[in-house]
Amino acid sequence: MPVVAIYFEDPDQHSLEFIAMLPDSPNPDGGIVSWDEWQRTRAK
């Protein structure tokens, strides 16, 4: 499933992950790509 994941710590130093679905079709062979790379492929 195409998602964007952001990892950060809250003020109490707890590790958190925010995940949001992206509007692309699943691509099991796509692997993990950076946000910049995803944006470049969407601009085409």
Image (cartoon, helix red, strand yellow):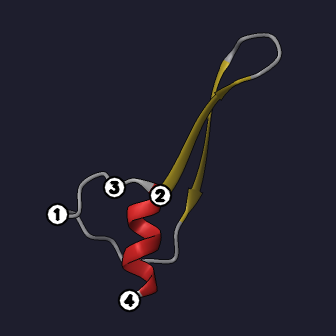
Question: In the shown orientation, is residue 35 left or right of residue 8?
Answer: left
Q: Is residue 2 visible?
A: no
Residue wearing tag 1: 29
Marking on residue 33: 3
Residue wearing tag 4: 44
Callout 4, which amino acid?
Lys
Which element is circle 4 on? Answer: loop
- CA separation, marks 3 and 1? 11 Å
Sooner in the amino-acid sequence: mark 2 or mark 1: 1
Residue wearing tag 2: 35
Callout 3, which amino acid?
Val
Q: Residue lying farthest bottom? A: 44
| Residue at the image point whose x is 38% and y is 63% from the top | 37
Q: Residue 8, image x and y in percent?
A: 64, 29
Q: Are marks 1 and 4 in contact (CB under 8 Å)?
A: no
Sooner in the amino-acid sequence: mark 1 or mark 4: 1
